[in-house]
Amino acid sequence: MPYKIVVKASARKEIERLPVNVTEAIDKKITMLADNPRLIGSVKLSGFINLYRVRVMDYRIVYSIHDEIIVVEIIKIAHRKEIYKHL
């Protein structure tokens, strides 16, 4: 059963500011997260209970997995140099 994807409003705004080719790659990766939120290449963030990240080009998608309600929440999308400054 695929997970439901919930994108925070702030993450949606971050996506809208990115170049089209990056946006398309991020959309594809988010779709893949619905089928398997623990993709090969996804990393659990240390220091956080339920946060993961996955790479898309020079950008990172930070998300949480809620297995009990079958939801993946996209929390933040940013360039790799900026992503960890605001978590």
Image (spheres, helix red, strand yellow):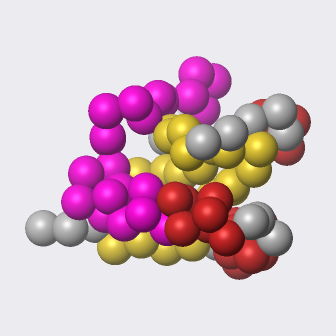
From what the image shows, is residue 82 above or below residue 34? above
Residue 61: percent from left, percent from top: 59, 49
Is 72 placed left or right of 3 in the picture?
right
In this orientation, does residue 39 appear? yes
Is 38 placed left or right of 28 in the picture?
left
Residue 60: percent from left, percent from top: 63, 43
Is 59 placed left or right of 27 in the picture?
right
Looking at the image, which is closer to me, 72 or 13? 13
Residue 72: within the magenta? no
- Picture residue at 56% right of the left edge, 28% below the top: 45
Quarter holding residue 7 = bottom right
- The number of callouts visible is 0
**Picture quarter with the N terminus:** bottom left
- Picture residue at 42% right of the left edge, 34% below the top: 42
Quarter holding residue 53 = top right
**Which residue reaches farthest top?**
46
Is 40 placed left or right of 29 in the picture?
left
From what the image shows, is residue 40 above or below residue 32? above
Q: Which residues are magenta?
A: 27-48
Residue 83: percent from left, percent from top: 77, 41
**Which residue reaches farthest front?**
21
**Which residue reaches farthest left?**
1
Residue 28: within the magenta? yes
Residue 82: percent from left, percent from top: 85, 39
From what the image shows, is residue 56 above or below residue 67? above
In this orientation, does residue 30 appear? no
- Picture residue at 75% right of the left edge, 50% below the top: 78
**Picture quarter with the C terminus:** top right
